[in-house]
Amino acid sequence: MGSFKPLLPLIETSLIERLIQLFRSAGINDIRVVVGHRADEVTPLIEMLGVQSIVNRSYHDGMFSSVLTGIQSLTLSTSGFFILPVDVPLVRRQTLLDLLNAFFQRNGKICYPTFLGERGHPPLLSMAFAQKIKCWSGHNGLRGFLALHENDAAEVPVADQYILKDLDTPVDYQWMVKRIKRYAIPTAAECRALMTKRLIVPERVFDHCRAVAGVALCIGKALKAAGCRLDLGLIVSAALVHDLARGKPNHTAEGSRVLREMEFPLLADIVEVHMDLSITNWVPITEAEVVFLADKLIQGHHRVDLSERFQSKLTKYGGDPVIRDRILSRKKNAFKVKNRVEAFLGKQIVELWPVCSKKPTNILRLNHDRAEAPLTLS
């Protein structure tokens, strides 16, 4: 790296401070930092934060010596322990919570977080493995030990691409500094992991969400090109997860609740109003309006005319006066948003379709290694 990793700045904190705050936010207060190289520089900060520092005097022997030092400090009352290198600083709080939940459901063992099938940091191990690790020969370090215990392993799918990202070079660091500014907006790949791995929504639901994301992106790009200030990454991510609670009572509120718990408040705000929303004419067009309109322009995973969509709804459910009023309200708002968008663009939305994919269920290139949200039509 060329710099001392634990003290690298990140917004208004350092990497080591961020990780301490991360574990505390997940309800873990017994946090132990193993120090060795340049220990005198990091120990005062650790102690100021009320965290125990464990000195590894054999740090020259490599990372496994630090793992051993940390494990040797644990007491028998410990039920399990995480191991996380300081150079994996962007792990999400929800990842720790998901690991803890899986760990206690399994009565211990070894839990690995996985992102789209790939294992990352941090593993959560039962204290039952501590003595075995202490006796390990050290061949291939902790990885070598864990490879012998696959029968005790459980993989926990998480919507967190950062479990795979460690910082080894200045380029990695610059990537991290750029990504942290958009940390509250999951990438398209993280949305995919949330929908298909963590929540496992029905395939037809995710197909619909991808189709909505494609139309929303198409409209959003056109609006932005015309001078409207919109966050395209936010539009795509919100569209990809807007129906994450489909099938549950009041699925908009439930979806919003899930996203707020995962610390995605911007997405939660949009998901909460994707069925219906109030519109103020003098306010600039918002990301929520774009997702709302795109959702109304997609039925299943196919584009539809607004009038046809609402007429089919009225034909099917219009016999109930309460439901009929809701449908008419959404129809009114959908046309209001459509008119606002077309007025801003100076053309009809249907004129945008030629630049959109002919396969709206397969429009997004989900590349989780890019710092920016993947917005390319494929």
Image (cartoon, rainbow, N blue to C red):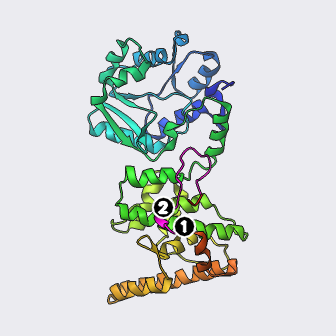
Q: Is residue 102 above or below residue 314?
A: above
Residue drawn at x 65%, y 19% as measured from the top left: 41
Residue drawn at x 52%, y 9% as measured from the top left: 58
Front residue (pair 72, 370): 370
What main secondary structure does the magenta stretch of the protein show? loop
Q: Which mark is residue 357?
A: 1
User: Quick one: quadrant of the C terminus?
Assistant: bottom right
Residue type at mark 1?
Ser
Front residue (pair 210, 232): 210
> Secondary structure beneath disc 1?
loop
Residue type at mark 2?
Asn
Sequence-wise, the earlier of marks 2 and 1 is 1
Quadrant of the rendered image containing residue 106: top left
Which region of the structure is painted magenta? 357-375
Q: Is residue 249 above or below residue 311?
A: above
Q: Is residue 281 above or below residue 165?
A: below
Q: CA distance from mark 2 to mark 1?
A: 8 Å
Q: Is residue 76 visible?
A: yes
Instruction: Report crowding for label 1: few under 14, some 14 to 19, many 20 or more residues within 10 A (C-alpha).
Output: some
Quadrant of the rendered image containing residue 77: top left
Residue drawn at x 63%, y 82% as measured from the top left: 348
Query: Residue 340's spot in the image, x, y percent?
Result: 63, 80
Instruction: Report crowding for label 2: few under 14, some 14 to 19, many 20 or more residues within 10 A (C-alpha).
Output: some
User: Quick one: quadrant of the N terminus?
Assistant: top right
- 358 is within the stretch colored magenta: yes
Query: Residue 233's spot in the image, x, y percent?
Result: 59, 58
Q: Which mark is residue 362?
A: 2
Query: Residue 323's spot in the image, x, y percent?
Result: 37, 83
Quadrant of the rendered image containing residue 116: top left
Left or right of 125 in this view: 372:
right
> Secondary structure beneath disc 2?
helix
- Dot 2 and dot 1 residues touching (CB under 8 Å): yes
